[in-house]
């Protein structure tokens, strides 16, 4: 009896330690939940690229690093180019004003110098004031060191999470199966379907954004060629690419891009009835060709193929409203976890029958449960 009591006390002590560790880990996760969720999103968005690169690059760490660069570099270059173009246009506007904007122009002067790289990249190397410009930019950035430091820390954590998931996902999946798999195979079936739909949704959104950007750039470039004399669409290709990025924004979507552009075109007509047709055509093309067609035709094929599209849209809408910015990723993740739990486990739990890995009929599914060719591996 004494031995049993000592064993029980030992187990109770270990359970207490486990509880403390669980509380600490839970506190860490809740404090940085947005960072962790975004890291998982980056992993799933990058995994198809990593699978293809792994066939060529044998080093797993190098393949993971190249995959992350391949995903992030285009977005960073587009963001830099957009900001530089905006600074150039603002500088041109301020130079045409006689009074009232000198303080603002003086404040933004170092960044105007940086924006000239877009117009003349060689000026970065050949300009006589290159060193002074760099020093000025560094001094300005130092005033925001704390802000950039926190942002860099979160970005570093995101990259670390995505990197090690890309490199070691198969080892993690094997460890999970060994520790938590049940004899009926329910856990493995559940995790497989969750992993498959995570991959479809997150990489599908990236693919849909790329296709939307290509369609937008082509449509706006053609419109600009057909524009009347004295009225044109500024930077049509850049505007089209921005619609692809904006398609990832919930609720508003690409309207955040083409609505301001339409307002600009209306103002640029100067009330001339002969020019009004162009802003109208621009809005129609933006809404039908760039907005509606990719959303209704492309998105169902590249995102959430095993889930009801309406449920996914609701997850994207209510996720940010409930959780903040990271709800854009957490909302669809919770939807996938819930749908497959309800389909695979809950009905048989409620009736008390033995749990089987085969899913019961799922009214939320609009497609078959056949495995996707693009997401055969578990994470």
Image (cartoon, grey):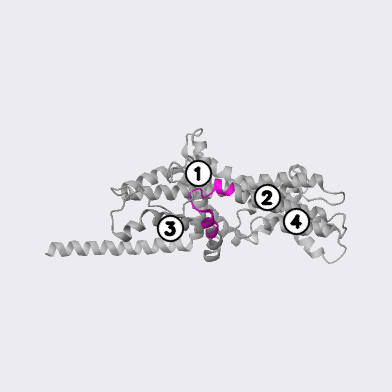
For the point 74% across and 59% down, the residue is 260
Q: Which residue is mark 3?
A: 338
Q: Which residue is mark 4?
A: 261
Majority secondary structure in the magenta region: helix
Distance between the Cα atoms at labels 4 and 1? 35 Å
Q: Up-down: is 156 above or below 52?
A: below
Mark 4 lies on a secondary structure that is helix
Q: What number is the disc on residue 290? A: 2
Between label 4 and label 2, give the one nearer the viewer: 2
In the rendered structure, the answer to whether residue 241 lies left or right of residue 57 reads right
Mark 2 and mark 1 residues within 8 Å of each other at the beta carbon: no
Residue 60 shown in magenta: no
Choose the circle earlier in sequence order: 4 or 3.
4
Q: Position of residue 360 (x, y in %)?
A: 37, 52
The magenta stretch is 298-314
Mark 2 lies on a secondary structure that is helix
Q: What number is the disc on residue 47? A: 1
In the rendered structure, the answer to whether residue 134 lies left or right of residue 363 reads right
Choose the circle earlier in sequence order: 3 or 1.
1
């Amino acid at each position: 009896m004494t031995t049993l009591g000592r064993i029980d006390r030992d187990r109770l002590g270990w359970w207490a330690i486990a509880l403390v560790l669980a509380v600490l880990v839970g506190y860490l996760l809740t404090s940085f939940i947005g960072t962790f969720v975004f890291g998982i999103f980056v992993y799933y968005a990058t995994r198809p690229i990593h699978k293809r690169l792994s066939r060529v690059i044998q080093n797993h760490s190098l393949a993971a690093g190249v995959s992350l660069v391949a995903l992030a570099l285009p977005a960073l270059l587009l963001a830099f180019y957009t900001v530089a173009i905006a600074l150039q246009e603002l500088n041109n506007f301020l130079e045409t004003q006689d009074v009232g904007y000198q303080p603002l122009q003086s404040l933004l002067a170092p960044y105007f110098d940086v924006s000239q790289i877009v117009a003349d990249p060689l000026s970065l190397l050949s300009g006589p004031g290159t060193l002074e410009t760099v020093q000025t930019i560094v001094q300005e950035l130092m005033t925001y060191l704390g802000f950039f430091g926190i942002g860099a820390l979160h970005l570093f954590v995101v990259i670390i999470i995505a990197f090690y998931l890309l490199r070691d996902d198969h080892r993690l999946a094997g460890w999970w199966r060994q520790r938590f798999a049940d004899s009926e195979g329910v856990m493995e079936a559940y995790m497989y379907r969750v992993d498959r739909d995570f991959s479809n949704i997150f990489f599908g959104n990236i693919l849909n954004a790329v296709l939307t950007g290509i369609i937008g750039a082509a449509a706006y470039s053609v419109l600009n060629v057909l524009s009347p004399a004295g009225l044109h669409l500024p930077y049509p290709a850049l505007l089209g690419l921005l619609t692809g990025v904006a398609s990832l924004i919930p609720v508003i979507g690409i309207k955040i891009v083409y609505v301001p552009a339409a307002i600009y075109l209306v103002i640029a007509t100067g009330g001339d009835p002969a020019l009004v047709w162009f802003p109208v055509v621009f809005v129609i093309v933006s809404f039908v060709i760039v907005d509606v067609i990719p959303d209704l035709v492309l998105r169902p094929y590249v995102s959430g193929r095993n889930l009801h599209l309406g449920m996914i849209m609701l997850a994207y809408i209510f996720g940010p409203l409930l959780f903040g910015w990271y709800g854009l990723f957490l909302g669809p993740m919770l939807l996938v976890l819930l749908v497959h739990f309800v389909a695979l486990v809950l009905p048989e739990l409620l009736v008390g029958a033995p749990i089987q890995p085969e899913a019961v009929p799922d009214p939320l599914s609009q497609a078959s449960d056949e495995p996707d060719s693009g997401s055969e591996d578990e994470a």
